[in-house]
Image (spheres, rainbow, N blue to C red):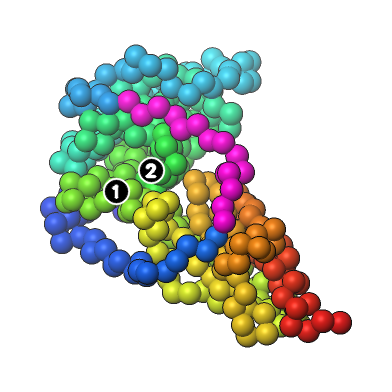
Amino acid sequence: MTTTALLLSLSAAMILAGVGLVWRDVRRSGRAAFLVRGDSTAARADAEVTVDRRASEPAADRRSAPASPLLDSGHAPEAAAQWEALQPVIARAVAQVNAVLAGAGVVIGGAGEPSWSMSRGYGVYRRLLISGESLAWLRIELDAGGQLQAGVKAHKEEHAGINASSAVAAGAIDVAGASDLLSECLKPAASFAMRAANGVSTERWASETAWKEVDAVVIAALHAANGALAQADARFVPLGAPDWAEEVRRHRLTVGVEVFATEVARMLIERIGEEIEVAVGLPDARLVALGRRDRVRVRGVTTHALAEVIAGCSWPAIAHFREVQHPV
């Protein structure tokens, strides 16, 4: 897609945002809590979110971007020269994209000092501001293979729905190509901003967006686990669609754990930041010791790996009720 077409499509999306997303509230009411949940498996300290009230005049950030160690210092002069040659094109592309996204309240901030990333890329961090608030870092860098990359990384897990990346060959890139690169990377952020401007809960939108990225592998893993445990007369039955849970403020899938066609436990599958959590609990507090909880990283997750977590978390409850109903 050419730059002009892509930017026009973004502009049109902003104009039509008023008739955009219609949320479907599938939250089932009146269901009693069943799961006894302990502390989280790992403490997480969210990065600070700062507010820049001068978003209309982005400048180089006073605060430092994430630290990037200097790698391959012997190639630094060559990489710096290549990067410097790209700056006029990148600067014009940033200005062009900012002009289009300004109507949605999205602004690419000023560039920090060039640095190396852990992935051996050389480039800069810029703040991504939405309605004047810094919600993410935008990293633009030239990688070792000659690709110009752009990546958005939210400061906080609840805004992970705006995370995105794109890449294009840096050789002979022009302003149109660089604008396409940035526009593609910023599509989730623009959608996020438009929904916020139209009164839609951006937190709920971000949660739904994050869940959609893992929905297919979750369903496939449940099917795989059902196949593996069929001989044990156990199966997993999703109880409706993934829905918004107000008490934890994120989407989750509730699954019935059945043994001999009788529900004996409930399973919750949630995406928490960059992990998928599987938790199994029982309604009888006397059997709380049979509950299990585990997590797997979203990055690189496979159907088999998630199915193993699902089976492992549910097996103590399954084994107990198999023994109760059909003692050896």
Q: Is residue 22 left or right of residue 220?
A: left
Residue that numbered label 2 is attached to: 159
Residue 257 shown left or right of residue 84 in the figure: right
In the shown orientation, is residue 326 left or right of residue 173?
Answer: right
Stretch in magenta = 36-50
Local crowd size for mark 1, using a 10 Å CA cut-off: few (<14), some (14–19), many (≥20): many
Q: Residue furthest front?
A: 286
Secondary structure under tag 1 reads: helix
Mark 2 neighbour density, 10 Å: few (under 14) some (14–19) many (20 or more): many
User: Disc 2 on helix, strand or loop?
Assistant: helix
Quarter the C terminus occupies: bottom right
Q: Position of residue 308 (x, y in %)?
A: 70, 63
| 106 or 249: nearer the viewer | 249
The answer, for residue 182, to whether it is visible in the render is yes
Q: Residue at x 61, y 82 (%)?
A: 262
Judge whether 123 appears above or below 317 on screen: above
Percent of width and height locating residue 148: 45, 36
Instruction: State yes or no: residue 42 in magenta.
Output: yes
Residue 251 vertical placement versus 84 (above, below):
below
Sequence-earlier tag: 1 or 2: 2
- Tell me if residue 204 is in the magenta stretch: no
Q: Which residue shows up at 63% across the image and 55% down it?
A: 293
The foreground one among 117 and 298 is: 298
- Which mark identifies residue 202? 1
Residue at screen point 22% across, 47% down: 196
